[in-house]
Structure formats: structure tokens, C-alpha cells
Image (cartoon, rainbow, N blue to C red):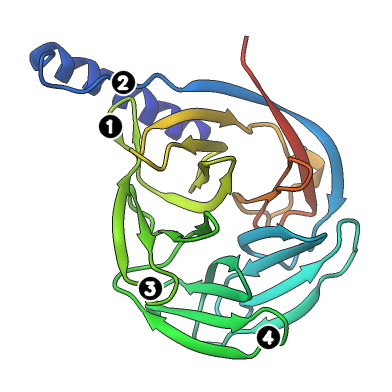
Amino acid sequence: MKRFFMTLVATAAVVACGSQAKKSVSLPQVVQPVEYSYKVKNIYPHSTNSYTQGLQYVDGVMWEGTGEYGHSEINTYALGDEKPQTKLKLPRNEFGEGITLLGDKLYQLTWESNVCHVYDVATGKKLRDFRYAGEGWGLTSDGEKLYMSNGTANIYRLNPETFSREGTITVTLRGEPIRFINELEWIDGKIWANVYLTDSILIINPENGNVEGIVDMSGLQSAEDKTVRTDVLNGIAYDSATGRIFVTGKYWNKLYEIEIHPKK
């Protein structure tokens, strides 16, 4: 999986350089991303029943949206809790995807049902549904707008009151589009994104889609923690009050607090 992504990165670089040689006058400057390693600061338990699709930390509570037909839920827990509390369950015919909290509302995407559910955060009562075209993958917010991925290279800026698209951000690495943009988190004015089937997290400039950083998360999960059920890295949460960053994966048994550093 890592090899797949690194091949993709290398291919993007070669194509970008080739194109630049032919059209050096007209092409915009290609951004070279900073490559980061990570350090684990703390480790917390994570439910191995959670097929993690969305993750957000708000006021001391971790909110987690999970997937799989018949098992899609929104759960909450405090760091260190062994068992999450189930807040909401989706119908068995819906596959849950990304979630985000904005104001007093909780938004939850679905994979192929083309619907975003909107709930009251305090009561869990469903307020309304929004329809959208295509698949739903990741979701985050900058405090005013929503940002949604759908498995392509595009992230859509959405009006939270209507769910209408107000802009499209095409994620590019060294000038080339990067597909499979998955779970999203807004951190210090940038969009952090998992890339499906890889051990990498991208740091994306939301103004132009340029990948400005790549966090190499390989080796995070130890061999003894992996089972036949363990799936890919997915889930990024940010504690805006302290600057802490948390990551986990689908059916992983641990949630990790990390810090990142430029590779030497």
C-alpha cells in the first residue's frame, strides 16, 4: 500500500517535470511538499468494532462515525474509555461515512445513498437530510463552511444551510491530481486528509489544493496489534484547545496522539 502511494508520488513528479519542460512558460510553480515523520505522544484504547469513517474531538469528547452496512453508527467517548457510547444508528441499508460538527449541528455522510443526515448535537434528533450527487467519503469544517471528499481528487466547499457546492478544490501533488482523498480534518487553516489504501496523510492548502506536506505514518501500528480484521489508516482529529492531533484506523485497537516533524 505504501509502495502504491510512493509510486503514485514518483509518477506525479515525473509527469509534472515532463510537462514543465514542454510548457515551462505557462505552467504555475510546482509546490514541493514538506515530508514529515511522526512521534507518538500518547496511546488510548479504540474499539475494534469501529470501522472508522469520521473522527472529531470537541470539548473533551471524541465523536466517531463508523461504516459497514448494518453497523453504521455515531459514537462518543472520552480519551481512555474502553467502550464508546452509541449516540445514533443508521438504517441497515446505509453505509456511514464522514462526520463533522458545526455549531449546534452534526453532519453525517453516507457512502452510496447520496444523503447527508443533519442532527441536533445536544439531543441527537434528526433535523433534516440533504441530497447530493456521487459518493460521500470525508467531511470537515472551517467553522463556517463544510468540506467534502468523494474518493476523487476533488474536495467540495459546501454551504452548511443548503449543502450546495460553492467551490471545488482539486488536490494536486507536485502539479498532478491525487485521487482517493478520504477522511478530512481542518487543522490551523489547512485540510489534513487520509488517502485511502495508504499510510500517508496529506496537508492541503484549501485555497489552491496544493499538497504542502506529506506525513509518513508507516509503522504506526505494530504487528502484534494487527488481526485479520484490521483495515487501513483512517481518522484524524484535532484538539484546537491544546493543539493535540489524534489518528486511528478501521477496526484498530488503539487511538494515537501524535506530533509531526520535518524529515531530516
Question: Residue 71 occupies which quadrant of the picture?
Answer: bottom right
Question: Residue 176 occupies which quadrant of the picture?
Answer: top left
Q: Secondary structure at mark 2?
A: helix
Of the numbered discs 1 and 2, the one sitting upstream in the chain is: 2
Residue at coordinates 63% horizontally, 32% vertically from top-left? 218
Q: In the rendered view, tell whether residue 91 sits above or below residue 186.
A: below
Other residues around mark 4 within 10 Å, as few (<14) / some (14–19) / many (≥20)? some
Using the numbered discs, state the Cα–Cα distance from disc 1 to disc 2 in whole angstroms.
8 Å
Residue at coordinates 58% horizontally, 67% vertically from top-left? 102
Number of the label disc, if any, that sits on residue 124? 4
Of the numbered discs 3 and 4, the one sitting upstream in the chain is: 4
Of the numbered discs 1 and 3, the one sitting upstream in the chain is: 3
* Left or right for 200, reference 14: right
Of the numbered discs 2 and 4, the one sitting upstream in the chain is: 2
Residue at coordinates 51% horizontally, 20% vertically from top-left? 34
The reply to whether discs 1 and 2 touch (Cβ–Cβ < 8 Å) is: yes
Using the numbered discs, state the Cα–Cα distance from disc 2 to disc 4 in whole angstroms.
46 Å
Using the numbered discs, state the Cα–Cα distance from disc 3 to disc 4 in whole angstroms.
20 Å
What is the three-letter code of the residue carrying label 4? Gly
- Residue at image mark 2: 13
Q: In the rendered view, tell whether residue 192 sits above or below residue 95.
A: above
- Residue at image mark 1: 176
- Residue at image mark 3: 163
User: Residue 150 or 9: which is nearer the viewer?
Assistant: 150
What is the three-letter code of the residue carrying label 3? Phe
What is the three-letter code of the residue carrying label 1? Glu
Nearer to us of marks 1 and 3 is 3
Other residues around mark 1 within 10 Å, as few (<14) / some (14–19) / many (≥20)? many
